[in-house]
């Protein structure tokens, strides 16, 4: 914790706080520290329990993803209220854990929009990589009914799922684009030059064209 405190950068904190994160540690330096520590599951648990955002990010980097049981990850996800901790936990830990699919289903139906966003993020990953067994039409029904008024983090994850359905599945492409056009979610999202807009119709069309599908 003392070493993490020395990595604090007021400028980095100011930038991070604009995105809802409450830490000021340079992530490159954090990754270098994690590389030095290597995998330490017990230390990761102790760092997580501090509740400190930088400590939890370090915990995620040095933990053993397959070393957590389902209930541990469920509790951790519900404790992860800052965007960066939430995203890293889902992408670096849960996706590599054998209980990932079970948690996806549980979180997808959770009334807490932050928890539900993790379920949608994992669902988007399944749509992209192994969609067998998913009710894609049913997912589109839910997106069509709920995405427009969903809180930001949940809306983003649902939009990601919508985009992947349109990109990966020709049969549902037209409907996915139509839903995106009618709901207009992220239509005016500021997109840097050279980057693809997250607005689903633009994203789907661009990626399909780029991949020659």
Image (cartoon, rainbow, N blue to C red):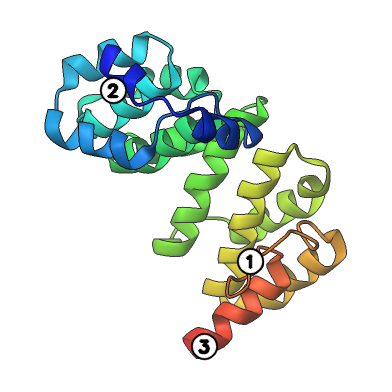
Label 1 to label 2: alpha-carbon separation: 40 Å
Query: At which x and y percent is residue 151?
Result: 75, 36
Q: Is residue 143 left or right of residue 209?
A: right
Splitting the image into 4 quarters, where does residue 113 fall?
A: top right
Name the residue that disc number 3 marks.
213
Q: Residue at x 46, y 63 (%)?
A: 128
Locate the N terminus by quadrant: top left
Q: Is residue 147 left or right of residue 80?
A: right
Which residue is nearer to you in this view: 169 or 190? 190
Label 2, secondary structure: give it: loop
Q: Residue at x 60, y 56 (%)?
A: 160
Specify whether residue 156 is in view.
yes
Which residue is nearer to you in this view: 58 or 164? 58
Query: At which x and y percent is residue 152?
Result: 72, 40
Label 3 to label 1: alpha-carbon separation: 25 Å
Label 3, secondary structure: give it: loop
Name the residue that disc number 1 marks.
192
Q: Residue at x 46, y 25 (%)?
A: 77
Query: At which x and y percent is residue 14?
Result: 59, 31
Q: Is residue 175 left or right of residue 203?
A: right
Name the residue that disc number 2 marks.
69
CB contact under 8 Å: marks 3 and 2: no
Q: Which mark is residue 140?
A: none
Specify whether residue 98 is in view.
no
Mark 1 Cα-neighbour bin, 10 Å: few <14, some 14–19, many ≥20 = few
- Mark 1 or 2, closer to the camera: 1
Q: Is residue 115 above or below residue 174?
A: above
Earlier-in-chain disc, 3 versus 1: 1
Splitting the image into 4 quarters, where does residue 159 fall?
A: bottom right
Which residue is nearer to you in this view: 213 or 15? 15
Label 3 to label 2: alpha-carbon separation: 40 Å
């Amino acid at each position: 914790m003392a070493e993490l405190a020395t990595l604090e950068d007021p400028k980095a904190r100011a930038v991070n706080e604009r995105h809802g994160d409450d830490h000021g540690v340079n992530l490159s330096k954090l990754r270098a520290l994690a590389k030095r520590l290597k995998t330490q599951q017990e230390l990761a648990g102790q760092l997580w329990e501090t509740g400190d955002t930088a400590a939890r990010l370090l915990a995620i980097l040095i933990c053993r993803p397959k070393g957590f049981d389902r209930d541990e990850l469920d509790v951790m996800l519900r404790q992860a209220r800052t965007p960066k901790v939430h995203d890293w936990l889902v992408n670096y830990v849960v996706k590599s854990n054998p209980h990932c699919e079970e948690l996806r289903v549980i979180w997808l139906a959770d009334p807490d929009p932050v928890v539900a966003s993790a379920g949608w993020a994992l669902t988007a990953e399944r749509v992209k990589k192994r969609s067998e067994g998913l009710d894609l039409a049913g997912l589109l029904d839910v997106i069509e009914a709920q995405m427009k008024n969903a809180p930001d983090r949940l809306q983003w994850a649902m939009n990601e799922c919508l985009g992947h359905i349109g990109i990966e599945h020709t049969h549902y492409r037209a409907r996915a684009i139509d839903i995106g056009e009618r709901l207009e979610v992220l239509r005016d999202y500021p997109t840097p030059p050279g980057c693809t807009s997250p607005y689903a119709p633009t994203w789907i069309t661009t990626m399909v064209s780029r991949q020659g599908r």
